[in-house]
Image (spheres, grey):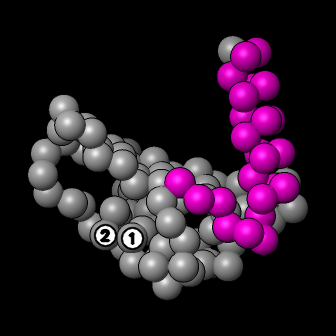
Amino acid sequence: MAKTKDLTISVPKDKIMYTNISKSSDGYNSARLVAKMGEKEYISISYEWEGEGVPGFAMDLMSSMQAASLKSGEVAAAFVEEYEAYIKKDEESNEED
Protein backbone atom coordinates (compact mmCIF):
# COMPACT_ATOMS: atom_id res chain seq x y z
CA MET A 1 0.00 0.00 0.00
CA ALA A 2 1.30 3.46 -0.89
CA LYS A 3 2.47 5.66 1.93
CA THR A 4 0.30 8.76 2.26
CA LYS A 5 1.47 12.24 3.19
CA ASP A 6 -0.21 14.90 5.25
CA LEU A 7 -2.25 17.42 3.31
CA THR A 8 -1.37 21.07 3.77
CA ILE A 9 -3.59 23.77 2.30
CA SER A 10 -2.46 27.36 1.96
CA VAL A 11 -5.01 30.07 1.13
CA PRO A 12 -3.60 33.53 0.38
CA LYS A 13 -5.47 36.12 2.44
CA ASP A 14 -6.22 38.23 -0.64
CA LYS A 15 -8.10 35.27 -2.17
CA ILE A 16 -10.58 34.83 0.72
CA MET A 17 -14.09 35.66 -0.45
CA TYR A 18 -16.23 34.61 2.52
CA THR A 19 -15.84 33.44 6.09
CA ASN A 20 -18.31 32.36 8.72
CA ILE A 21 -18.02 31.07 12.28
CA SER A 22 -21.11 30.05 14.19
CA LYS A 23 -22.00 28.44 17.51
CA SER A 24 -25.42 27.10 18.32
CA SER A 25 -27.08 26.60 21.69
CA ASP A 26 -27.14 22.80 21.18
CA GLY A 27 -23.34 22.63 21.11
CA TYR A 28 -22.95 22.33 17.32
CA ASN A 29 -20.34 24.71 15.90
CA SER A 30 -18.97 25.40 12.45
CA ALA A 31 -16.37 27.46 10.64
CA ARG A 32 -16.34 27.99 6.87
CA LEU A 33 -14.04 29.63 4.38
CA VAL A 34 -14.54 30.16 0.64
CA ALA A 35 -11.72 31.48 -1.55
CA LYS A 36 -11.25 32.21 -5.23
CA MET A 37 -8.00 30.46 -6.10
CA GLY A 38 -7.96 31.25 -9.83
CA GLU A 39 -10.20 31.93 -12.80
CA LYS A 40 -13.25 29.70 -12.23
CA GLU A 41 -11.39 27.92 -9.40
CA TYR A 42 -12.72 27.96 -5.84
CA ILE A 43 -12.00 26.22 -2.57
CA SER A 44 -14.54 25.77 0.19
CA ILE A 45 -13.44 24.46 3.58
CA SER A 46 -15.94 23.59 6.30
CA TYR A 47 -14.99 22.54 9.82
CA GLU A 48 -17.57 21.29 12.32
CA TRP A 49 -17.26 20.37 15.98
CA GLU A 50 -19.22 19.91 19.17
CA GLY A 51 -18.51 21.32 22.60
CA GLU A 52 -17.12 24.47 24.13
CA GLY A 53 -13.55 24.24 22.85
CA VAL A 54 -12.45 26.04 19.69
CA PRO A 55 -10.15 24.04 17.36
CA GLY A 56 -7.06 25.49 15.74
CA PHE A 57 -8.69 25.91 12.32
CA ALA A 58 -11.42 28.13 13.76
CA MET A 59 -8.89 30.17 15.75
CA ASP A 60 -6.74 30.64 12.64
CA LEU A 61 -9.81 31.63 10.64
CA MET A 62 -10.79 34.21 13.29
CA SER A 63 -7.26 35.68 13.17
CA SER A 64 -7.43 35.92 9.37
CA MET A 65 -10.84 37.57 9.55
CA GLN A 66 -9.60 40.15 12.04
CA ALA A 67 -6.50 40.89 9.95
CA ALA A 68 -8.69 41.42 6.86
CA SER A 69 -11.30 43.41 8.85
CA LEU A 70 -14.00 40.88 7.93
CA LYS A 71 -16.97 39.98 10.08
CA SER A 72 -18.42 36.49 10.29
CA GLY A 73 -20.85 35.89 7.44
CA GLU A 74 -19.57 38.87 5.47
CA VAL A 75 -18.36 38.69 1.86
CA ALA A 76 -15.10 40.51 1.15
CA ALA A 77 -15.89 43.71 -0.77
CA ALA A 78 -13.57 42.78 -3.67
CA PHE A 79 -15.45 39.50 -4.23
CA VAL A 80 -19.16 40.31 -3.92
CA GLU A 81 -20.03 39.53 -7.57
CA GLU A 82 -17.77 36.46 -7.72
CA TYR A 83 -19.21 35.05 -4.50
CA GLU A 84 -22.79 35.55 -5.71
CA ALA A 85 -21.92 33.70 -8.95
CA TYR A 86 -20.21 30.94 -6.93
CA ILE A 87 -23.26 30.49 -4.68
CA LYS A 88 -25.63 30.46 -7.66
CA LYS A 89 -23.57 27.83 -9.48
CA ASP A 90 -23.31 25.75 -6.27
CA GLU A 91 -27.10 25.90 -5.75
CA GLU A 92 -27.74 24.89 -9.37
CA SER A 93 -25.31 21.99 -9.00
CA ASN A 94 -27.11 20.79 -5.86
CA GLU A 95 -30.48 20.92 -7.64
CA GLU A 96 -29.14 18.57 -10.32
CA ASP A 97 -28.04 15.95 -7.74
Residue at left offset 27%, top offset 39%: 24
Estimate the x, y position of residue 25 in percent, counting from the top left: 20, 37
Range shown magenta: 73-96
Cβ–Cβ under 8 Å for marks 1 and 2: yes
* Closer-to-camera residue (32/81): 81
- Up the image or down, 75 lies above or below 92; here it is below
Please tell me in which quadrant of the rendered image residue 55 appears. bottom left
Q: State whether residue 76 appears in this view.
A: yes
Q: Under tag 1, what secondary structure?
A: helix
User: How packed is label 1: few (under 14 Cα within 10 Å), some, or many (20 or more)?
Assistant: some
Estimate the x, y position of residue 87 in percent, counting from the top left: 73, 40
Left or right placement of residue 4 versus residue 11 in this view: left
Residue at left offset 87%, top offset 61%: 39
Estimate the x, y position of residue 34 in percent, counting from the top left: 61, 56
* Closer-to-camera residue (76/56): 76
Q: Quadrant of the C terminus?
A: top right
User: How packed is label 2: few (under 14 Cα within 10 Å), some, or many (20 or more)?
Assistant: few
Q: State whether residue 10 appears in this view.
A: no
Residue at left offset 78%, top offset 25%: 92
Q: Quadrant of the N terminus?
A: top left
Please tell me in which quadrant of the rendered image residue 43 appears. bottom right
Residue at left offset 40%, top offset 54%: 21
